[in-house]
């Protein structure tokens, strides 16, 4: 339990002149105990707190992880000896010099004091609260303290301190997340717009609830939360939020373009666009937008006169009465053209004498009125029906809405097009401005998940379940980690790709380890991973951190990986240095070689597969075993003199093929510099160049072409007789085909089926590659003809 005695100590000292602590309270569940041995003892402190009545919606304190303060970074790199320490320090100094500008940019970023690492649970439905202190007078300021007292203070946010984006980003991985927006309809729209902007988006999208603190609060009324906060107990509100149900709400997009056929009559006051391009509640133009605009301009000029909900409504009534006499928008139907779902309704506006036109997404408008008559139309109005209700209003109908009357129902539509020929006031969700002559198009954008007060007969919306994570497994050696642990981009480049894995986001790292070890044992498609490997956290902070194996049960896969899962193999070498190390590096293929030799001795044909993939779950490439220089020079083995293998002065290695397959140029270069042949081939005769062409690794192709003989470029495999150019053409690699032809690849070479590379590309319907190769054939033919 978390005990806070200081509050009671202060009360006791003030009332009785004593500083003795008479009671203690838990900061989470708020249980109170007398400070006596019979009521409270030290054993209570060690008890697990239940978090009280609001436990399902409280963010547990165990989810909050404090980050090291700026300038107090502790590296997780172990230093084995003084030499390693000195080498590491030199590397760090050199790297710091090279990355000085990048570090200066990172220092400008705001330091995060903590992060949220949620523990997946079906029992916890965390609610993060966004409060706009400016809404509803001083109510927002009071509610901020009350929510922080009853909930975890880390889940309550003041919108004036940076907006809702920081809170949503912080809790993006929290399961079953819900959002409570405390403010007016504009506050809710702000939160929904940020949810749209997040990249990548939160999946599943959190449901948004409303605590009305604004003036109209029409969205809160439509969702059943009432027209305003009336000092209800916060505990009651939290219980209702916990028992609320999810519903869908349509959201509409507005596209505004200038009407070039008409000149603007109010250049100084008009704008090119509406204040908001997404409609949550309603969109209108005419007299009601004019009144809303006058109200906003008056409030900006004299904010002290608009400090209560009653005064705001009185001002609206005064402006409405003024326009009832002046009738400024009696000719509105002559200034606009209205088209809904392809039908022109301008004549209907003129017949009704409308001074304003409303497009309603929710049934409530203007502080609780209902302009739409449910008896009109094909279906009853709903917030999730994909229809917008179009209503016309006169200056007589506008004030009578408060008495329960309705406006003139025009239609229900899915799309609308409005053309204006003069500057007209318009408003979107209460935000008004004057818009110059324009063409406005409206269509459905998406459906937001909202929290509505539970109502009998209404079913909950099933929120999409958590999707499985698709992760790329990347392996790092200790040398790579020590050198680049501060540089995420460089680590991503030098890491060795092992394969992909699909996994539940709720798995802890112990479960993930078991799954990976099983994959490593089953597959021989890549160098064996040692048992002494660990996970790397690439999400928590700006640097990468190793996860202690003893603490893997405390971390979840969603905490440390987004699209890539990094593992650190302590025994992995960046490159094989000696023949003994090379054999250890390729131990997985030696086992397969022994099995094949055993089958041949018994007169059996070893099994083969058509798939030569190197990723998990596929068969590995097998190449000849390393041989000493004496064997290479003096033996008559066909592996030495056979076509398709390396020269006598170079060693062959399946690691060369692995590097070409995975696109690891650093490993390939290192292997070649150590004396390993670029002509290494598997039992099918496929070389590194074949694999680089197949998997579109242009840098590998370029390196191989520059450092290998032309013999390698035109080497054909044993299975289909295809050269590297055949492979590039078969997979539609035009850029690689250009490189190979420029390097001297034989365009006329034919495979075992009698096809040239051009014919291969044509058969696979890669017509661009086929056309290029055909043009090169014609060019070579004409050149030879001219020479003769």
Image (cartoon, grey):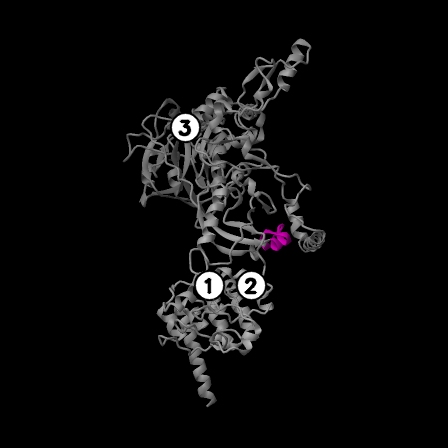
What residue is pinned by disc 1? 695
> Which SS class for mark 3?
loop
Please state the horizontal and vertical placement of residue 473, each as a whole percent of the image: 50, 52
In the figure, 660 relative to 202: above or below?
below
Q: Residues within 10 Å of mark 1 (few under 14, many from 20)?
A: some
Quote the CA–CA distance across marks 1 and 3: 52 Å
| Residue found at x 52% / y 46% | 561
**x, y percentage for residue 237?**
46, 23
Q: Nearer the viewer, mark 1 or mark 3?
A: 1
Q: How far apart are labels 2 and 1 at the CA level?
A: 25 Å
Give the number of the mark in front: 2 or 3.
2
User: Who is closer to the viewer here, 151 or 517?
Assistant: 517
Which range is magenta? Answer: 478-490
Other-residue count near label 2 (Cα within 10 Å), few / some / many at <14 / 14–19 / ≥20: many
Q: Which residue is mark 3?
A: 244
Res 36 quadrant in image: top right
Looking at this view, name the residue that lies furthest to the top.
Answer: 16
Q: Is residue 520 left or right of residue 105?
A: left
Question: Viewer-proximal residue, 531 or 58?
Answer: 531
CA gap, disc 2 to disc 3? 63 Å
Q: Nearer the viewer, mark 2 or mark 1?
A: 2
Q: Is residue 376 above or below residue 624?
A: above
In the rendered image, residue 489 lying in the magenta stretch gets the answer yes
Q: Which residue is mark 2?
A: 582
- Residue 304: horizontal and vertical position, in percent? 58, 25
Q: Position of residue 255 (x, y in %)?
A: 43, 45
Q: Secondary structure at mark 1?
A: loop
Q: Is residue 553 above or below residue 48?
A: below
């Amino acid at each position: 339990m978390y005990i806070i005695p200081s509050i009671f100590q202060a009360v006791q000292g003030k009332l009785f002149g004593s500083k003795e602590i008479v009671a203690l309270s838990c900061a989470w569940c708020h249980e109170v105990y007398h400070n006596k041995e019979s009521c409270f003892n030290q054993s209570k402190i060690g008890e697990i707190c239940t978090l009280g009545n609001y436990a399902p919606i409280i963010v547990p304190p165990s989810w909050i992880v404090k980050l090291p303060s700026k300038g107090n970074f502790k590296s997780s790199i172990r230093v084995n000896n003084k030499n390693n320490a000195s080498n590491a320090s030199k590397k760090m100094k050199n790297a710091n010099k090279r990355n000085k500008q990048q570090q200066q940019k990172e220092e400008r970023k705001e330091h995060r004091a903590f992060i949220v690492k949620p523990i997946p649970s079906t029992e916890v439905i965390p609610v993060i609260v966004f409060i706009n202190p400016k809404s509803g007078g001083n109510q927002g300021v009071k509610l901020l303290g009350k929510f922080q007292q009853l909930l975890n203070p880390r889940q309550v946010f003041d919108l004036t301190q940076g907006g809702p984006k920081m809170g949503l980003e912080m809790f993006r991985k929290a399961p079953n997340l819900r959002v409570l927006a405390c403010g007016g309809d504009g506050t809710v729209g702000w939160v929904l717009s940020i949810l749209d902007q997040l990249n990548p988006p939160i999946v599943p999208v959190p449901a948004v609830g409303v605590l009305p603190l604004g003036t109209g609060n029409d969205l809160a009324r439509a969702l059943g939360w009432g027209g305003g906060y009336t000092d209800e107990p916060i505990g009651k509100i939290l219980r209702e939020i916990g028992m609320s149900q999810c519903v869908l709400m349509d959201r509409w997009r507005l596209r505004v373009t200038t009407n070039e056929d008409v000149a603007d009559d109010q250049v100084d006051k008009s704008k090119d666009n509406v204040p908001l391009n997404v409609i949550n509640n309603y969109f209108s133009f005419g007299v009601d937008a004019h009144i809303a605009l006058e109200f906003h301009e008056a409030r900006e000029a004299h904010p002290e006169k608009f400090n209560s909900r009653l005064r705001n409504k009185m001002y609206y009534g005064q402006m409405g009465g003024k326009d009832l006499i002046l009738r400024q928008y009696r000719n509105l139907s002559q200034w606009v053209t209205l088209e809904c779902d392809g039908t022109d309704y301008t004549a209907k506006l003129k017949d009704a004498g409308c001074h304003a036109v409303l497009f309603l997404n929710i049934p409530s408008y203007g502080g609780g009125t209902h302009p739409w008559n449910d008896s009109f139309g094909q279906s009853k109005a709903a917030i999730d029906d994909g229809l917008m209700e179009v209503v016309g209003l006169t200056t007589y109908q506008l004030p009578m809405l408060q008495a329960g009357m309705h406006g003139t129902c025009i239609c229900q539509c899915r799309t609308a097009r409005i053309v204006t020929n003069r500057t007209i006031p318009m408003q979107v969700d209460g935000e008004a401005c004057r818009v110059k002559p324009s063409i406005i198009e409206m269509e459905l954008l998406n459906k937001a998940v909202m929290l509505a007060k539970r109502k009998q007969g209404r079913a909950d919306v099933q929120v999409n379940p958590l999707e499985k994570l698709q992760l790329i497994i990347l392996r790092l050696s200790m040398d790579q980690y020590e050198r680049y642990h501060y540089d995420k981009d460089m680590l991503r480049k030098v890491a060795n790709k092992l394969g992909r894995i699909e996994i539940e986001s709720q798995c802890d790292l112990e479960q993930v380890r078991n799954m990976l070890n099983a994959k490593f044992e089953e597959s021989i498609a890549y160098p064996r991973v040692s048992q002494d490997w660990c996970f790397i956290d690439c999400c928590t902070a700006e640097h990468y951190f190793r996860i202690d194996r003893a603490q893997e049960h405390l971390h979840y896969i969603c905490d440390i990986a987004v699209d890539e899962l990094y593992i650190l193999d302590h025994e992995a070498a960046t490159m094989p240095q000696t023949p003994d190390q090379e054999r250890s590096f390729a131990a997985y293929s030696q086992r397969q070689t022994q099995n094949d030799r055993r089958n041949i001795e018994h007169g059996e044909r070893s099994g083969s597969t058509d798939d030569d993939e190197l990723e998990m779950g596929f068969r590995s490439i097998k190449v000849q075993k390393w041989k000493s220089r004496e064997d290479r020079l003096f033996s008559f083995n066909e592996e030495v003199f056979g076509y398709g293998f390396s020269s006598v002065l170079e060693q062959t290695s399946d690691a060369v093929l692995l590097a070409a397959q995975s696109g690891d140029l650093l490993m390939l270069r290192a292997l070649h510099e150590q004396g390993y042949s670029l002509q290494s081939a598997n039992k099918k005769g496929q070389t590194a160049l074949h694999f680089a062409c197949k998997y579109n690794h242009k840098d590998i192709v370029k390196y191989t072409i520059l450092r290998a003989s032309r013999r390698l470029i035109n080497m054909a495999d044993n299975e289909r007789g295809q050269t590297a150019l055949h492979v590039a053409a078969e997979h539609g690699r035009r850029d690689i085909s250009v490189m190979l032809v420029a390097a001297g690849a034989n365009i006329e070479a034919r495979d075992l089926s009698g096809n040239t590379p051009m014919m291969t590309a044509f058969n696979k319907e890669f017509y661009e590659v086929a056309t290029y190769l055909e043009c090169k054939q014609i060019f070579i033919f004409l050149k030879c003809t001219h020479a003769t």
